[in-house]
Amino acid sequence: MSHEGIRILSEEEQARESAENRPLSRSAITPEKVRVLLTEGKGLEIDWADGHRSAWSFAWLREACPCATCVEQRKIEGRRPGQPKPKPAQLLPMYSPPAKPSSAHGVGRYAIEFAWTDGHRSGIYSWEYLRRNCRCSECRFANAETKGSPN
Ligand SMILES: [Zn+2]
Ligand SMILES: [Zn+2]
């Protein structure tokens, strides 16, 4: 009897196996230290319990807002979390100041929330979401490789 058939994964199963959905250990999504570099305007840094360190710029975080409205908007525009909106074709583009939060605070024990200076404040960034979107070259390389994307 051939077992080859069970090796064939449906598209859905393949997606589930992709880097975005790979299971993370508890220590990988448990922050040891969280630094919000508000005054420097730099971004967010997290030292994880598994020894990994992640950092995100505020600009990236704003464009990766996980609220339903922003997720829907990105889906329509075909943008990945953190990917900026394409610049409008205007002769004199309006100056938009870089995204910055006016405040940040923890949500329970699982997430962080930002109040952005543009008035938006619906996004709740779970530790898991952040870890899955770590910007370090190691994680980005691993994600691109598993997804088979050249970028
Ligand atoms: Zn949002
Ligand atoms: Zn990383």
Image: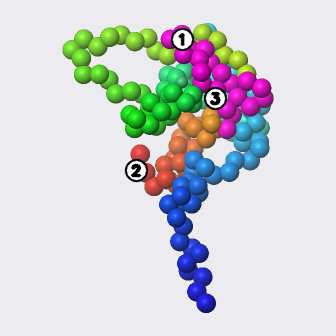
Q: Dot 1 lies on which element?
A: loop
Q: Position of residue 116 (x, y in %)?
A: 56, 14
Which dot, 3 or 2, sits closer to the camera? Answer: 3
Above or below 147: residue 128: above
Q: Nearer the viewer, residue 61 or 41?
A: 61
Q: Nearer the viewer, residue 135 or 114?
A: 114
Q: Position of residue 80 (x, y in %)?
A: 46, 37
Residue to which mark 2 is pinned: 150
| Amino acid type of the residue tagged 2 in the rendering | Pro
Residue to which mark 1 is pinned: 119
Which dot, 2 or 1, sits closer to the camera? Answer: 1
User: Which residue appears at 59% of the width and 37% of the height?
Assistant: 134
Q: Determine whether label 1 and label 3 are within 8 Å by CB.
A: no
User: Which residue appears at 59% of the width and 21% of the height?
Assistant: 122
Q: Which residues are magenta?
A: 107-128
Q: Position of residue 82 (x, y in %)?
A: 49, 31
Q: Residues within 10 Å of mark 1 (few under 14, many from 20)?
A: few
Residue to which mark 3 is pinned: 125
